[in-house]
Image (cartoon, grey):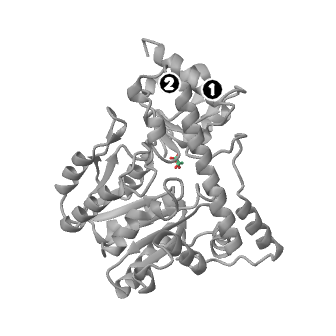
């Protein structure tokens, strides 16, 4: 019966993370998966999350099914965080939002919806992008192509090439974009570039799908949503996936949402209905616990303030680690590969190390990066940054790798 089923080669990120857990070496360093660890190398439980969870547990509640679209208060809180408290489109009811199983769930529900209503569209992702983007859209039945994005020579953005490729796409093509803290490169568009791109998207009648998995890890909660707010302001129909895995350190609770910016409240109601039907066909309805925590934090002023402060301190720590590794690599890494540690934003830096060099780092030194060369800066700390920099220097000095 199952002879034709081939062996799963594993996922480039999640399987590597599982390999790390099995590695018996005591001095191993996990810079692979996109998870923020504190300076002691621990996964933090944020203060506001701890308080919200404790207060929820004080009044144990029954656990009925949530509506297919999710917890109403959560969906409202998501809209306010992603689109802004004073969003006109939100007040007009032009944004349809469903609660999803993390950002991946949002991408999958969105992919299913788009496949049904725009069956002729193809999906275009940045070169490179998060591996699961391609995987989710291909599994939903799309042909997925790439547009130029990252410039290895400079560690920056190929903006002109990106625009010119997008300019040639047929109308209704789906263009997948990262709102901030691009994964895996850490290279973002600046505000002026976003304006130019949005103008092009409008003129070419393209369908943007913006993935915002790192709100708050770039320039701040509002600034990171610049592209999304601008799409709304300019009445551009768009899909937006967001996640609370990273900015709430709630990875395992799978808290995310999919929002669609529509031209009218009436269209938003129909879109919401069909997104709900996509949820039903995938997993019926989302889970309760994490959504309640997020809602409690976002809607309770003291908890909200505590959360924002702690998130800001996480960003400060990441910035400090960028400085630390940069200082330790200076002299051991060619100048062209060094500036990116300071310039790229968010959790990741695209080191420029080859897959072979990454393999040597893992096998000889127990230091895990993704084979694309992506390093999770948010997992560096004062104890592992020196070893990591030393090992990178050694690997780069080897001639045969
Ligand atoms: C990552 O990119 O490492 C994270 O988003 C985790 C994942 O699911 O891949």
Q: Position of residue 18 (x, y in %)?
A: 61, 39
Q: Secondary structure at mark 1?
A: helix
Q: Secondary structure at mark 2?
A: loop
User: Disc 1 marks which residue?
Assistant: 386
Q: Position of residue 273 (x, y in %)?
A: 43, 81
Q: Position of residue 318 (x, y in %)?
A: 58, 44
Q: Residue furthest top?
A: 399
Residue at (55% x, 63% y) in the render = 101
- The reply to whether residue 6 is in sight is no
| Figure disc tally | 2
Q: Which mark is residue 370?
A: none
As drawn, 105 above or below 383 = below
Q: Is mark 1 within 8 Å of ligand 1?
A: no
Compared across the picture, whether 87 is left or right of 248 comes to left
Residue at (39% x, 50% y) in the render = 188
Q: Position of residue 19 (x, y in %)?
A: 61, 34
As drawn, 162 above or below 309 = above
As drawn, 334 above or below 270 = above
Residue at (73% x, 40% y) in the render = 40
Compared across the picture, whether 271 is left or right of 247 comes to left
Q: Which mark is residue 330?
A: 2
Compared across the picture, whether 325 is left or right of 158 comes to right
Q: Nearer the viewer, residue 168 or 385?
A: 385
Q: Nearer the viewer, residue 157 or 260?
A: 157
Name the mark nearer the viewer: 1 or 2: 2
**Quarter of the rendering containing residue 368:** top right
User: Badge 1: how crowded within 10 Å, few (<14), some, or many (20+)?
Assistant: some
N-terminal label among 1 and 2? 2
Q: Nearer the viewer, residue 95 or 230?
A: 230
């Amino acid at each position: 019966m199952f002879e034709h089923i081939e062996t799963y080669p594993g996922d480039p990120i999640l399987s590597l993370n599982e390999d790390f857990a099995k590695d018996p070496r005591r001095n191993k360093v996990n810079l692979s998966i996109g998870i923020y660890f504190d300076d002691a190398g621990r996964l933090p439980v944020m203060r506001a999350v701890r308080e919200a969870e404790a207060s929820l547990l004080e009044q144990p509640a029954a656990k009925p099914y949530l509506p297919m679209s999710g917890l109403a208060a959560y969906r409202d809180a998501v809209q306010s965080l992603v689109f802004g408290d004073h969003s006109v489109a939100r007040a007009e009811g032009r944004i349809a939002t469903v609660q999803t199983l993390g950002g991946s769930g949002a991408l999958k529900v969105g992919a299913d919806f788009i496949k049904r209503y725009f069956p002729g569209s193809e999906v275009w992702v940045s070169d490179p992008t998060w591996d699961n983007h391609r995987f989710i859209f291909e599994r939903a039945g799309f042909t997925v192509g790439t547009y130029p994005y990252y410039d290895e020579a400079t560690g920056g953005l190929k903006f002109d090439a990106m625009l010119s490729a997008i300019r040639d796409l047929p109308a209704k093509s789906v263009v997948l974009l990262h709102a901030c803290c691009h994964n895996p490169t850490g290279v973002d568009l600046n505000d002026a570039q976003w304006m130019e791109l949005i103008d092009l998207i409008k003129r070419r009648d393209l369908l943007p799908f913006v993935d915002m998995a790192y709100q708050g890890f770039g320039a701040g909660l509002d600034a990171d949503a610049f592209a999304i707010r601008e799409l709304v302001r300019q009445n551009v129909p768009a899909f937006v996936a967001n996640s609370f895995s990273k900015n709430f350190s709630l990875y395992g609770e799978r808290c995310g949402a999919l929002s669609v910016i529509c031209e009218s409240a009436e269209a938003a109601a129909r879109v919401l209905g069909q997104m709900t039907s996509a949820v039903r066909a995938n997993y019926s309805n989302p889970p309760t616990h994490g959504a309640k925590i997020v809602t409690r934090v976002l809607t309770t002023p003291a908890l909200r303030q505590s959360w924002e402060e702690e998130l800001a301190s996480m960003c400060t720590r990441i910035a400090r680690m960028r400085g630390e590794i940069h200082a330790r690599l200076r002299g051991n890494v060619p100048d062209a590969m060094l500036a990116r540690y300071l310039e790229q934003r968010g959790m990741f830096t695209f080191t420029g190390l080859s897959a072979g060099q990454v393999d040597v780092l893992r096998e000889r030194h127990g230091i895990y990066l993704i084979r694309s060369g992506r390093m999770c800066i948010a997992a560096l700390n004062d104890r592992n940054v020196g070893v990591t920099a030393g090992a990178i220097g050694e690997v780069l000095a080897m001639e045969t790798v």
